[in-house]
Amino acid sequence: MDRYAPKPNIKKGDEVLVLAGKDRGKQGTVNRMVIKEDRVRAVVGGVNFVKKHTKGRPGVRQAGVVEMEAPLHVSNLMLICTQCGKPTRVGKTQLPDGRRARVCKKCNEVIDRS
Ligand SMILES: [Zn+2]
């Protein structure tokens, strides 16, 4: 990962709340992380659809308008805690076995599934 990129608090498979943009308030699951230079973005299922106009390529795809999910910047997403079900900020902790884990700032429970 780029040394300028802060380690994202959000990972693939997380349930997140959208904080900004036209889909503010929607929730979805992170399908894919898009990490590019200093930006970390996430594709969230069912959120931030954009219409993309594509040129047809014979045998590959049809020309026309395709709707697809555009990646959202992680700063516009908030993790939904798997323990208390609330959108929350994320802290870090060290587990007794030495592994690092994410912690919910609301309920102080460890979020990561082992
Ligand atoms: Zn919680």
Image: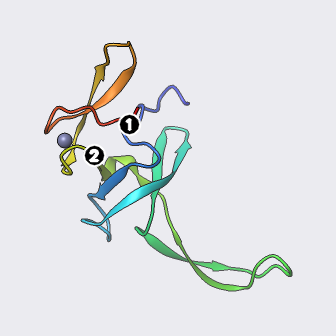
Q: Are marks 2 and 1 in contact (CB under 8 Å)?
A: yes
> Which residue type carries mark 1?
Arg
Q: Judging from the image, what secondary structure is the residue with disc 1 in?
A: loop
* Marks 2 and 1, the one that precedes in the sequence: 2
Q: Is mark 2 within 8 Å of ligand 1?
A: yes
Q: Measured along the vertical axis of the image, is residue 1 above or below residue 62?
A: above
Towards the viewer: 13 or 72: 13
Q: Where residue 100 sits in the image (x, y, percent)?
A: 37, 21
Question: Eyeballing the image, is 29 above or below 109?
Answer: below
Label 1 environment density (alpha carbons within 10 Å; few <14, some 14–19, many ≥20): few
Q: Is residue 34 above or below residue 103?
A: below
Quadrant hosting ligand 1: top left
Amino acid type of the residue tagged 2 in the rendering: Thr
Residue at x-position 56% and y-position 43%: 36
In the image, residue 10 lies at what x, y percent?
Answer: 38, 42
**Left or right of 21 on screen, residue 51:** right
**For residue 94, side relative to residue 4 (left or right):** left
Residue at the image point whose x is 47% and y is 43% from the top: 39
What residue does disc 1 label? 113
Q: Secondary structure at mark 2?
A: loop
Query: Is residue 27 depicted above or below 67 in this figure?
Result: above
Q: Which residue is mark 2?
A: 82
Residue 47 x, y percent position in the rendering: 40, 67
Q: Residue at x 35, y 53 (%)?
A: 15
Residue at 42 percent of width and 68 percent of height: 48
Please count the marks in the image.
2
